[in-house]
Amino acid sequence: MSDLKIGIILGSTRPGRRGDQVAQWVLEQASQRDSATYDLVDLADFNLPHLDEAASASQGKYANDHTKTWAAAIAQYDGFVFVTPEYNHSTSGALKNAIDFLYAEWTNKAAGFVSYGVAGGTRAVEHLRLIVGELQIADVRQQVAVSLLTDFEGYTTLKPLPHLEPGLNTMLDQVESWAGALQTVREGALVSA
């Protein structure tokens, strides 16, 4: 087993969300691999309020216990798979808020995206790519778009079409590759600090 740790971040806290099914599917597929350890990180478990830190996250001066808990959870990972809904042509406010709480814990790590929505959530990923770029997260090209129309039975029960699995595996390959390479970057930054 590799020492790579990848967090699958469930980016919705909405009651009745579909993201828990999508994130669980990603975790089930990823858990069949032996090249990294995958964990589910559910934003709903952290109860983050609207951003309430006085100092910029780039300063790393976290005053609140909920921020420190969130920072410790994210710091342990080498990369991420963001599972995002698409709300109003963007990602969820809960995910954006959670991302904004931190800086160094995200930096020089890799990320991939699994989105879901009527149009597969692709517009949410477009926005997330801009956000993670500012945090120096290396996002991979391959993404997975899960349609509420074709991959959910009655808009409620996930039944992913077979064509999604190869794309998911390609995305996971890319995240693992970049996450491994970026371990060296982070180690170099620690040595020079």
Image (spheres, rainbow, N blue to C red):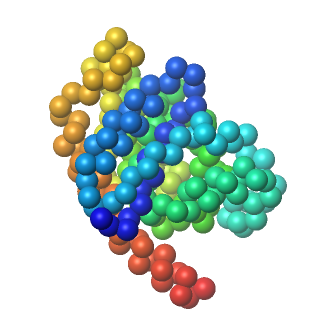
Q: Residue 126, can we see it?
A: no
User: Where 22 sits versus 40, above or below?
Assistant: above
**Which residue ends up furthest to the front in the rendered image?**
1
Residue 60 placed where, x, y %?
70, 66
Q: Residue 80, can we see it?
A: yes
- Measuring 60% from the left and 85% from the top, which residue is drawn there? 193
| Left or right: residue 175 compared with residue 54 | left
Residue 62 or residue 125, whichever sits in front? 62
Residue 31 placed where, x, y %?
31, 48
| Left or right: residue 61 compared with residue 120 | right
User: Where 118 sits versus 85, above or below?
Assistant: above
User: Where 78 sits versus 31, above or below?
Assistant: below
- Measuring 44% from the left and 25% from the top, which residue is drawn there? 18
Quadrant placement of the N terminus:
bottom left
How many badges with numbers are in the image?
0
**Which residue ends up furthest to the bottom in the rendered image?**
192
Residue 71 placed where, x, y %?
63, 58
Residue 140 or residue 40, whichever sits in front? 40
Q: In which quarter of the image is residue 143?
A: top left
- Measuring 40% from the left and 26% from the top, which residue is drawn there? 117
Residue 97 placed where, x, y %?
64, 43
- Measuring 38% from the left and 36% from the top, which residue is drawn there? 24
